[in-house]
Image (tube, coloured by chain):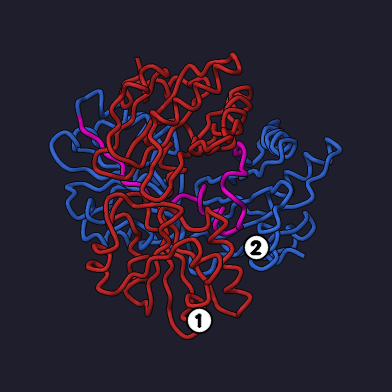
Chain colours: A blue, B red
Amino acid sequence: MLTFVGLGLYDLDDISVKGMHAIEKADHVFLEAYTSRLMGTDPAAMEERYKKPVQILKREDVEQHPEPILAAAKVGDVVFLTGGDPMVSTTHSDIRIRAAEQGISTRIIHGASIASAVSGLSGLQNYRFGKSCSVPYPAKNWFPRTPFETIQANLAADLHTIVFLDIQENRYMSVREAVEILEKLSSEEGVSISLYVGMARAGSPEPVVIAGDAAKMLNAEFGPPLHILVVPATLHPVEEEYLRIFADLK
Amino acid sequence: MLTFVGLGLYDLDDISVKGMHAIEKADHVFLEAYTSRLMGTDPAAMEERYKKPVQILKREDVEQHPEPILAAAKVGDVVFLTGGDPMVSTTHSDIRIRAAEQGISTRIIHGASIASAVSGLSGLQNYRFGKSCSVPYPAKNWFPRTPFETIQANLAADLHTIVFLDIQENRYMSVREAVEILEKLSSEEGVSISLYVGMARAGSPEPVVIAGDAAKMLNAEFGPPLHILVVPATLHPVEEEYLRIFADLK
């Protein structure tokens, strides 16, 4: 049996009670640590809490050489841990498909996801979000315009946009870096983004949520990662009041 | 202190460990039971598990007369439980705003939400969803076209649509009822929806996920509530394979 368990957002206590039970029963625990990261804990603390070894998986361990995970799941109970909610990424779909092809039963134990947490932190209503987008770190000769195009299409339809920020090995894009990239693109297009909502450390005891224009975002202190950004459409009165009270909107 | 705690999707064990700690510490526990419902448990079982009383809130208790909740939060620790992830609904934003206006500190402990769980259950990738919509039970002289329009706009942009189904007191819309409504609208418009993905009891040990056309949906057995529906856009190869394996797509 292969059970995918979502760890939730920030630390060891964000997993569900059901997820903890699955870990207690497991013969092997694997941690997928390349699509997301829990900043409020680390693998050593997990092993201490779970009282069993936690094997860290790199992307190639899942996508190229998943045989050890599948072999263990054929004969015993295997838990596959991921930040947030499992299966939001194709890499998880892929290993679940491979398991099923080998006759291994699978199960998903859901966890809190940043995709719904941004609604709570910002007060921006879930049903008013359009397609989300991601801002990657630019590389040599590569400065993708896609996130800006998604934001523009959503604004034209009066929809909010979640902007996921790049997560690389030991490098986490900040709100400031993302806003710099979006402002460069928007000045090239001659259209401006009038309001951003930046968020840091969702799920932690002290998340930071700040709403304002680009100048305010570039000078705001969000603190350590993970960060995420929303570009809101026109605000409903309750959304506006919420941002004034909980996100310092002027 | 007023702490909003998400119960997650289905039963008593879907709450986070952090959420359980908040309940243990709480002087008063309230349960908001009108925007969502956990079908795998009930208030009596909650009281037994939590070893304290759980006060059920109707909509008017939150929106018209929140004074008892706020008064308790002024002098002690109050937990406000909701299905899924808190604040996805304006009714939660509203009471958080009122609390802040009275100088009461507030906090959110996130839970798994159906909005991200549908990605895991269907394999449909999170970043390919557009705006979501809701199908309400039609009333006399009221048969809203909005959900169909949202689906059409998303399909035109090649985006998937989550279709939330109506939840009323002791009445939960089924996939079959929702598909009947959408098919009526689509035949009026002369455009047809070629593929649906219906899901039942997300978060339970045996969720049902079935993909197919309207005829298949109208005859499929999804079992007890809650149900939810997705109208997918064109499928990526991994999405298609996932639906063939886990949702009986032909």
- The answer, for residue A34, to whether it is visible in the render is no
- For label 1, the residue is B71
Left or right of A164, for residue B180? left
Is B163 placed left or right of B172 in the picture? right
Q: Who's the residue at 73% across and 43% down the image?
A: A182
Residue farthest toward the bottom in the current orientation of the protein: B75
Which residue reaches farthest front? B140
The C terminus of chain B lies in quadrant: top left
- Of the residues tagged 1 and 2, which is closer to the observer? 1
Q: Which residues are magenta?
A: A104-133
The percent coordinates of residue A112 (x first, y second) are 42, 52
Residue A6 x %, y %:
36, 48
- Above or below for A227 versus A190: below
Q: Residue furthest right?
A: A190
Please tell me whether residue B123 belongs to the stretch shown in magenta: no
Residue A158 appears in the picture as rendered: yes
- Within 10 Å of disc 2 (Cα), the crowding (few <14, some 14-19, many 20+) is many
Picture residue at 25% right of the left edge, 48% below the top? A29
Q: Which mark is residue A242?
A: 2
Quadrant hosting residue A40: bottom left
What chain is tagged by disc 1?
B
The quadrant holding residue A51 is bottom left
Residue B186 is situated, as x and y percent measured from the top left of the image, at 55, 20
The residue sitting at 51% across, 50% down in the picture is A116
Three-letter residue code for mark 1: Ala
| Residue occupying the point 36% across, 34% down | B199
Q: Amino acid at mark 2?
A: Tyr
In the rendered structure, the answer to whether residue A146 lies left or right of residue A171 reads right
Q: Is residue A117 left or right of residue A210?
A: left
**Residue neighbourhood size for the residue with mark 1, other residues' Cα within 10 Å, grouped as few (<14), some (14–19), many (≥20):** some
Disc 1 secondary structure class: helix
Q: Identify the secondary structure beneath mark 2.
A: helix
